[in-house]
Image: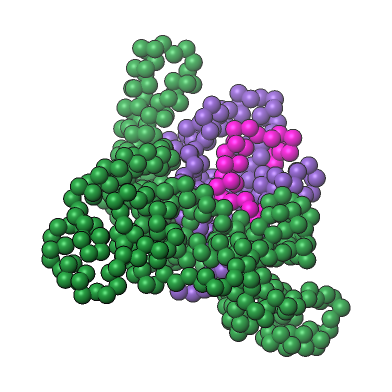
Amino acid sequence: MGSVQESMQNTSDPSEWLQTQLPPIYQLDSMLRCHICKDLMKAPVITGCDHCFCSACIRRALSTKAQCPLCQDEQYETQLRKVLLLDETIAWFSKWRSELLEKVKLVQPTETVDMSKTDSSGATSSQSRSVSSSVPSDKPITQYFYKSRKGEQQKAKAKVSAELVECPICSDFMTLEELQGSHIDECLSDPSTEPKPTNTPAFSSGFFTAPSPKQSPRKQQQRMPLVAPKTYKFDMDKPHQTQASGYANLSRMPKLDFNSLSTTKLRERLNTWAIPVSGSRRQMERRYNEYMILYNANLDSRNPVPVKVLLNKLWQWDALQNGTPEDTELDAEAKKDSREARMERKRWRKEHRNDYADLIQRARENAKKVKTTEDYSDNTIGESNGDLKATEVEEVEEEPLFVDGT
Amino acid sequence: MPPKSTAQRRLAKEYQQLSKDRPEGILAGPVREDNLFVWECLLAGPPDTAYEYGVFRAVLTFPKDYPLAPPSMKFDPPLLHPNIYADGSVCISILHAPGNDPLQYERSEERWSPVQSVEKILLSVMSMLAEPNTESGANIDACKLWRHDRPAFERQVHQQVRRSLGL
């Protein structure tokens, strides 16, 4: 597996909601994302111009240019303020996101399968990409989904209430076989089957599953098999918008004026923060700056991590920075690869020269027909029409050939 | 899995989003599975322009500190256009970091900022193809041709369109 595929699997992005029963969550998801890293915001802060970013992202951006990336207003790191409520909101959202996504996924995503197919082919075969063949179908699909889902959902609901029966003990809904098979016994022997309407977590009661009047709270819990009702623990006693104690008063790491520091002094400074002092002076300076960003961003988090974790992150960052030999190797390979791709294309063109010629010939004849029937006066229009037809035919015939080849 | 840099994570995200929600006439993705820093894109020539029906290949190269710094974009093979250098490099404000503005004519909100994206770049390039900016030309010959001998300009572009289709 290539790393692109790997990182794709580990990436969440708002468009995942488009293929669910609740496409509008797409907007909520995008709003909670940082404009710089496109991830859900970590330790969000607000600038003097009222824009929110991840603390680390905006600090890094401001260190290259003292300007808000969104509105280009002049901004400084000292103006940044943490937004604990947003931090909590995002923490909630990222905690439940994958489960929610699972719940509202479309049951029969026939169209989605097609879409993912085109995706993966786009990922692997850069040569087979053809603009006109794969573009037009995308946007209407999501709209179509949104509309068609409503109808399907209603049908599904009607079907559910028609086929399910209610358990007399826990008033849960299930199929008759299930009820008669094992459920009644379980229900009678389980002491916790008393209906507990107040115990239901707020969000499962009708936020994401439209409740029909007959549904009992128990029934909705049943619909969330991934998490048993007992595991819904809310930190109700924990006050909102507070930071873990002990961090609120910690002072931030200062910016250093490297020009006025001797290398020995710089080393001392690094030592006081337990930052590694290996490498050249330039490396030490960059390491200090990176750690300053990590450290100060950590103070903006609702639940700051121990310094150890930060140092570990710094170490990872260091490893990525020093990975230059590997990078240049990659670049070289990429160059070689594009050369190979070009050769491949040439070879393809040579191999299928006759097909192309044939298609062009046919297209020209078509163009002539068009010309004679509609009597084009402009020569160039007729010709370019012919070209277009030729390419369309090519793409149609090219695609299956390519699949066979691989 | 090796730790991913911010740039790699962000590029993976953009690629994922682009492949799901594709703007019309634009295809883009990494050339190689294991290197997210070089992308290949195919742009369809905007309709009602000399570039119509063409499918143009360009290479986007991202810096290691992306998205703090913009990528560079190069048409390969080069394309005749007032804002594309003779070697194929694209000269457009969105690809210029706000710091360096040698000519002082670009407004800072048009220029690169970390909130821009590959999608926005490619859409800007598409509209650049449709509406060249001859006041800040990169290819002076193309500029002259475009201004003084439009038919000749269009003839040359037509040739490139045909070549882009392998004709």
Looking at the picture, does residue A297 appear above or below residue B109?
below
Observer-nearest of A150 and B151: A150
Q: Residue at x 77, y 52 (%)?
A: A73
Locate residue A322, reporting x and y percent.
61, 77
Asked which quadrant contains residue A283, the reply is bottom right
* Chain with green colouring: A
Q: Which one is in front, A371 or B112?
A: B112
Identify the image quadrant of the N terminus of chain B.
bottom left
Q: Position of residue B161 (x, y in %)?
A: 50, 34
Relative horizontal placement of residue A6, taking residue A307 as reference (left or right) = left
Q: Is residue A401 visible?
A: no
Give percent across and percent down for residue B17. 48, 52
Q: Is residue A221 magenta?
A: no
Q: Nearer the viewer, residue B5 or A213?
A: A213
Magenta-colored stretch includes residue B129: yes
> How many marks on residues?
0
Magenta portion: prevailing SS class: helix
Q: Which chain is assigned purple?
A: B
Q: Foreground: B36 or A76?
A: A76
Name the image quarter holding the C terminus of chain B. top left
Q: Which percent across, then down, holds residue A144?
A: 37, 38
Residue sitting at x 36%, y 57%: A103
Residue A132, placed above or below residue A247:
above
- Residue at point 70% right, 44% down? B110
